[in-house]
Structures are given as structure tokens and as C-alpha cells.
Amino acid sequence: MDGLSHIQSIVTFAWWIALDLSVLLYILLDGADLGAGVFSLFVRSHHERGAIMSAMAGTWDANETWLIVAGGVLFGTFPFVYGSAFSYLMVPLALALWGMITRALALEFRHLAETPWQRFSDICFGVSSLCVAFFGGMAVGALLQGFPLTNTPGVVPTYIGGSFRFISAFSIWTGIAAVIAVTLAGMLFIRARFEHGEPIREQAARWTKTMFYVALAAVGLTVVVSAIIFPWASQKWFGGHFWVWGLVLLAVVFVAFKMREASRRDRDVAAILWFNLAVAIMAVAMMVTVYPWIVPGTWTIYTGASPAVSLFTFTLAMGGFFPVMLMYNAYQIWVFRARISALAAYH
């Protein structure tokens, strides 16, 4: 029995890593699409807005698949967390889902509409991208704050609280910070996808200079606020291994400035890779900080996991899915790697 419990703990830990990897891949891949959508709100040219949609037309749906994978892993491996967290975050997740649906409709139907309705689709595309980023970031901030559960012996714990408990100064800030981060990613994406000399690429290049420092400041502010309001974060960051966390911070700053240097030299793909590396380092640092919690103060990855039979059945059914998804994403990115111009407007 102890051996089975030990194996179950290892499998649970592995699926927690898979869950975090799925969310990270969604942020890295679809975050750039969302940021390009936010950036499109400030693009005047009708054809350039259409070209932004054309730039992501071959990959955006595959990028969003990682969010579905994350939801499936959460449901299959951590059902207790799934049930209570979705009750807690019903409002922001519903608004984010509305944004995803509206964004997809704007992308798919723009080329079928007359010009006035194309402009309406452009607005829907930009606003819905903003909503997905903001309310998604807000949901993450609310999760980090935890939520109350029932405590009845023999009964599965469920969320107790109002529909708007997720709203706080911190969750609003994480929503704003998410918009800042994806907007920077979107600008790097536009620079990498458009031909040199295109006006929209030049506009993105000018904005990147400012947004880089805004994003860096947002990261710094988030770290400081988190250290102040979350004891589980400050205890790890300033404990016996504080020097390790100092090295992590220096690594993030170093990688960020490497991204800035690559961007300044028009090495667009390198800039995206450096940016993604910075996000990945911060994501891993957050995972280590939060562990063993999946929702700080509410659920650990072990108390929120499925019973052994369900867990192993899910592993057998889904274990080979991740390599297929990774190959699928890599193939799509390779096929649609060429730069485009405003002449490629999605119409």
C-alpha cells in the first residue's frame, strides 16, 4: 500500500508538471496572438489590421489547444481543484471565454463581411483579445490568493464565497500586468511576421522600446507586492536559499536585456526566443515557490489529486498526447514561418 501511495505521488507530481507546462505553452504561443490583437486596437490601417489576423490565421487555433489540454489535465488529475476553483473563478473565466469566442468569430468571419462590418470585426478582435488577457491574468492573481472551502467530514470540500470574491487590488494588478506582457509579446510577433520596411512593423518597433521597460517594471512590482502579501512566497525567497532566488532574478534581468538587444538589432526570432526564455524562467520560479500548493492555502497537489485508479487510467489514456501536440505545433510554426505584408490582409 505504501508503495502504491509513493507511485501515486510521483504520478501526481508528473501531471502537475504537465499541467504547468500546458499553461506555459499556452501563454508563450497564444500570448503573442493576444498581444497582436491588443496592438491592433492602435493600428489605423484597415489592411494592416487584416494582415495581423492573416499572420496568425494558420496557428492561432492550435495555440489555444494547449488551454484545452490544461483544462483536461486539471479535470482528470485534480478534479477537486477543478470543481472548487471554477466555482470561485466563474465570472472572470466566463468573461475570458466570451473573449475567446468573440475573437474566433472575428477571425473567421472578417473575410466574409463587407468593409463596414470588417471594421466592426477588427474592433471585436482587439477588444476580445484584451479581455482574454486581462481576465485570464486576473484569474491567476485570484488563485494565488486562495479561497475558502467547506470543511464537512466525509464530504468533498467545495467553494464557499460570493461570485465576486476574486476581485482584489492584487488580482486587478495581475490582469493589467498580463495585458502588458502579452502586448510586448504581440509586438515581437508582429516584427517577426512582417516584411522589413512595412509601416506596421516600424510602429511595433517603436512601441517595443517603451513597452520593454514597462514590462520590466511590472515584473518588479509584482515580485515586491507578492513578497509583501504572501507569506509562503517571502519565506522561500528570503529563507536559507535566498541567494538562489537572487541568481534567478539576475537571470531574468539578463535574459530580458538580451531580448532588448536582439530586438534593437532586428534579430526578431532571437528576440522572441529570449522573451520566451524569460517567461519560462519566471514560470519555473513560481512553480517552485508555490509547491506543494496548487492553490496556495487551499489545495496541495496531493490533496487535490484523483484517487489512484482514476489517476492511472487517465495516465494510460493521455500519456502519449503531449508529444503529438508538440510535433503538431512545431510543424504549423514551420509551415507558416514566412514573413508577410499588409497585402496579405485577411479578406
Image (cartoon, rainbow, N blue to C red):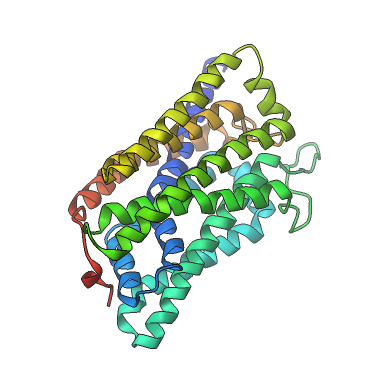
Question: Can residue 30 be seen at all in this image of the molecule?
Answer: no
Residue furthest top in the image: 240
Choose top left, top right, bottom left or bottom right for residue 106. bottom left
Q: Residue at x 40, y 85 (%)?
A: 117
Residue 281 seen in this snapshot: yes
Determine the residue positioned at 59% across, 13% down.
241
Foreground pick, 12 / 190: 190
Identify the residue at image location x=57%, y=56%. 134
Report the front residue among 41 and 212: 212
Nearer to me, 131 or 341: 341
| Residue 300, horizontal then vertical, whole percent | 64, 31
Q: Is residue 152 left or right of residue 144?
A: right
| Residue occupying image coordinates x 77% and y 43% | 148
- Count of number-bearing discs: 0
Q: Is residue 201 above or below residue 184?
A: below
Q: Residue furthest right?
A: 152
Location of the C terminus by quadrant is bottom left
Q: Quadrant of the N terminus?
A: top right
Q: Is residue 328 above or below residue 123?
A: above
Q: Is residue 329 above or below residue 285?
A: below
Measuring from the top left, give residue 295's x and y in whole percent: 64, 38
Quadrant in the rendering for residue 262: top left
In the displayed structure, does residue 115 sit left or right of residue 70?
left
Residue 86: % across, % down: 63, 52
Residue 185 in the image: x percent, y percent?
Answer: 41, 49
80 over 114 or under it: above or below: above
